[in-house]
Image: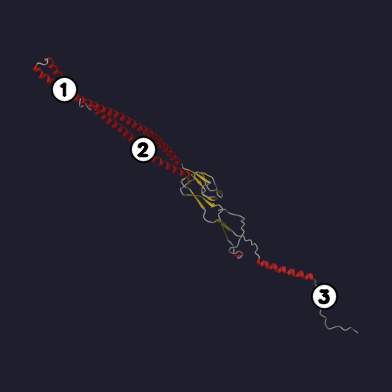
Amino acid sequence: MYPKVPQSLPTANPDEILPTISRWSKASSIILIGIFIGAIALAATLKYKVTIKAPIIVRPEGELRLVEAGIEGTVERIEVKNNQQVQQGEIIAYLKEQQLRYTEQNLQANLEKIKQQLEQIQLQLVALKTQIKAETLANERTIAAATSRWHLLEQEYLEKQTVTQADVREAQAAKRLAEEELSLYQQLEGTGAIAKRQLKEKEAALEIAVARLQRAEALVNPSKSAVKEAQQEIAKTQALGESNLAELKQEQELLLRQQTDLEKQRQSAQHSLQQMQLNLNKLTIRSPISGTIQELSLRNQGQVVELGEVVAQIIPQQAPLIIKAQLNQNAISQVKVGQGTTMRIDSCIYT
């Protein structure tokens, strides 16, 4: 007899088949799941570097500084080259212009000649001033001496005039006395009281008194010719001195006019020389700023440079750079406006 077979198999319980999961295994699983979820969250929130390769153009912000030739000339020597850093005032090149050198030499020679003429005139003016002073003193002394002589002659004339007037009065008194005595003797002669000889003596005394009076009257007005000559000498000396001084002062005025004209010529020549030196300084082309030579138009010696011609272009030192990148469509979505970037240039063509 066969055993009885059941119609269906009993259902298996997982707990009856799998081993029991420990507490530490459960904790580890939870931690791993948390890390995975955290990583996804961090990936969604944290920023990470994206490398994009693209062609770019780098140029300084603003305009390049142009260096222009301040004068026409020929290149004598070039001191810099393209892409070279230069400092403000550093020499870029030397130009030469022979005609300017000749003109400068002529101006210097002319200026030196004018200075010598001014020095000669100054010496003449000093000598002339001394001569005028000496002439003035000499005239004053001569006039003073002539005036003193005139005063002396005038005094002598007045003294003579006083003496002769006294002599006239004395002669007049003697004549009256002789006339009275003669009249008395003439009266006594008729009486025989006096001798005839005594009467003749009185007549002779009267004649002497008359002659003395005539002589005194002749001298009563002495000649003023000496006094007049002294006055004329004073006037003559004064006129001669004034004439000499006038000639000296006229010569002085002429020298002063020449000095003024030469001083104007000196100032004009000095101004022309300074202007010429400015032009000569322009033959040395210098960098107006510190920076880098972007482009140098000077190629070789003997090159002709025109006035105002651009000879170099300089990038200002520490000028901000403008970078333009040409991104493809796929890369555009990976960048945003205002996003910071780190640039690395693999190769560069400097133009």
In the figure, 64 relative to 129: above or below?
below
Q: Position of residue 23 (x, y in %)?
A: 79, 71
Color encoding of the figure: secondary structure
Q: Residue furthest bottom?
A: 1
Q: Position of residue 171 (x, y in %)?
A: 18, 23
Tell me the residue that label 3 is attached to: 17
Tell me the residue that label 2 is attached to: 256
Tell me the residue that label 1 is attached to: 177
Describe the element under mark 2 as helix, strand or loop. Answer: helix
Neighbourhood count class around disc 2 (C-alpha, 10 Å): few under 14, some 14–19, many 20 upward:
some
Residue in view at x 12 percent, y 20 percent:
184
Describe the element under mark 1 as helix, strand or loop. Answer: helix
Please state, as top left, top right, bottom left or bottom right, where the N terminus lies in the image.
bottom right
Cβ atoms under marks 2 and 1 closer than 8 Å:
no
Q: Which amino acid, by three-letter code, is at mark 2?
A: Leu
Q: Residue furthest right?
A: 1
Structural distance between the alpha carbons of marks 1 and 3: 211 Å
Q: Nearer the viewer, mark 2 or mark 1?
A: 1
In the figure, 226 relative to 324: above or below?
above
Q: Which amino acid, by three-letter code, is at mark 3?
A: Ile
Describe the element under mark 3 as helix, strand or loop. Answer: helix
Q: Earlier in the sequence, mark 1 or mark 3?
A: 3
Residue in view at x 29 percent, y 32 percent:
238
Camera-side residue: 302 or 235?
235
In the figure, 114 relative to 88: above or below?
above
Structural distance between the alpha carbons of marks 2 and 1: 80 Å
Q: Nearer the viewer, mark 1 or mark 3?
A: 1
Neighbourhood count class around disc 1 (C-alpha, 10 Å): few under 14, some 14–19, many 20 upward:
some
Q: Which amino acid, by three-letter code, is at mark 1?
A: Leu
